[in-house]
Image (cartoon, rainbow, N blue to C red):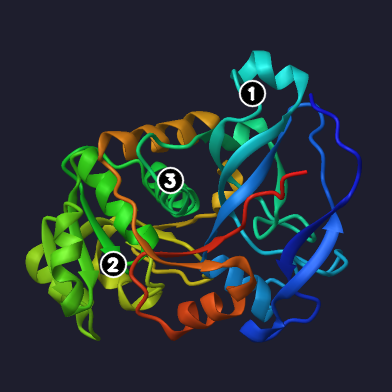
Amino acid sequence: MSTTQSSAMKAVGLHTYGGPDMLHTVELPEPHAGPGEVRVRVRAAGVNPADAMLRDGSLAEWYRDFEPPFIPGMDVAGTLDEVADDVRAAYGLSEGEPVIGIVDNHGRHGGYSEYVVLPAASVTRQPVGTTLPEAASFLMNALTARCVLDSLALAPGSTLVVTGAAGAVGGYVIQLAAAEDLRVVAVASQHDEEQVRSYGADTFLVRGDDIAQRVLDVVPGGADAVADGAMLHDRIAPAIRDNGQIAVLRFWDGDPGRGIVVHPVNVRSRVTDTAAITQLREQVESGELTLRVSATLPADQAPEAHRLLEKGGVRGRLILEFPPAATV
């Protein structure tokens, strides 16, 4: 492993919860890779709804034992510049390789940083043929979609309703489900129909208050399961058959009854699932998963990126770009 004198790095974080303007540049000690770890020189970081939840205080209870600044960011792409000796043999990784990684961010550890140290199990090579912003745009969302489908464990031919189908997670649920021969009923706004159908949805329904009934109109008896990216919860539950399933992406303490099983999904449980991470990278390379970048902004414009995210209607991931390390 290379050795580097301890010095400072720049990151984007917050000391106080609130709106996008709470984000600002901070200096932190450079982290270094220990056993089983690698250090990534971050060149691009994805901006996810989870980052906004950290910033606005929605995760305050989870962060109460940490000292600020808090650094958001779960998706990164960049270059390996430190690799622990045990990682070389176990993972075949070495300095200089372009990689992507998923960050289980907490406290001062987050992807909006010039450098981030990750378990080698959380990293895979950058998909061939992708730009750095593209490479930073998908892993957390695609791995969340993988969690959804694994929790439901549907047999080929089963019917899956995907709400929030035009969102980043919803789109990947559709693509992964289509690759596994599931029948997908996608729910989104009218202007997203063409995009959602391109992911492989069999049926498209416009979202609305009567969505559960309209699902039943096309799936008599009810769907086998719902991937509830739009967090419709009780509003979509009537569309599920007796003893069916619903996967939810945020906490829900509701009980839909009729034997319906609720699966809370948390991607953090899979951030060291090397096999799943590698498979997702391979599915990008094969074209089964498509990458969607909405816009790229310099890292110091993180507040603007969060404003755009909160405004809504973003199709594709917003990306923060970090400049290359200065040449010494």
In terms of image quadrants, where is residue 51? bottom right
Q: Position of residue 200 (x, y in %)?
A: 16, 51
- The three-letter code of the residue at mark 1 reads Ser
- The three-letter code of the residue at mark 3 reads Ser
| Circles 2 and 3 in contact, beta carbons < 8 Å | no
Identify which residue is drawn at 66% across, 64% down. Answer: 72
Q: Position of residue 147 (x, y in %)?
A: 45, 46
Q: Quadrant of the N terminus?
A: top right
Q: How many marks?
A: 3
- The three-letter code of the residue at mark 2 reads Ala
Q: Position of residue 100 (x, y in %)?
A: 53, 41
In terms of image quadrants, where is residue 36? top right
Query: Of marks 2 and 3, which one's residue comes earlier in the chain?
Result: 3
Q: Nearer the viewer, mark 2 or mark 3?
A: 2
Task: Tell me how far mark 1 sits from mark 3, CA to CA.
Answer: 34 Å
Q: Nearer the viewer, mark 2 or mark 1?
A: 1
Task: Tell me how far mark 2 sits from mark 3, CA to CA.
Answer: 21 Å
Side of 260 relative to 65 (left or right): left
User: Which residue position is annotated with label 1?
Assistant: 94
Q: Is residue 132 above or below residue 1?
A: below
Query: Of marks 2 and 1, which one's residue comes earlier in the chain?
Result: 1
Residue 151 marker: 3
Q: Position of residue 143 (x, y in %)?
A: 46, 46
Identify which residue is drawn at 38% across, 34% down. Answer: 128
Task: Tell me how far mark 2 sits from mark 1, CA to CA.
Answer: 37 Å
Q: Secondary structure at mark 3?
A: helix
User: Which residue position is annotated with label 2?
Assistant: 166
Residue 72 marker: none
As drawn, the residue found furthest toward the front would be: 328
Residue 251: in sight, yes or no? no
Along the line of sight, the residue nearer the viewer: 187 or 218: 187
Along the line of sight, the residue nearer the viewer: 16 or 27: 27
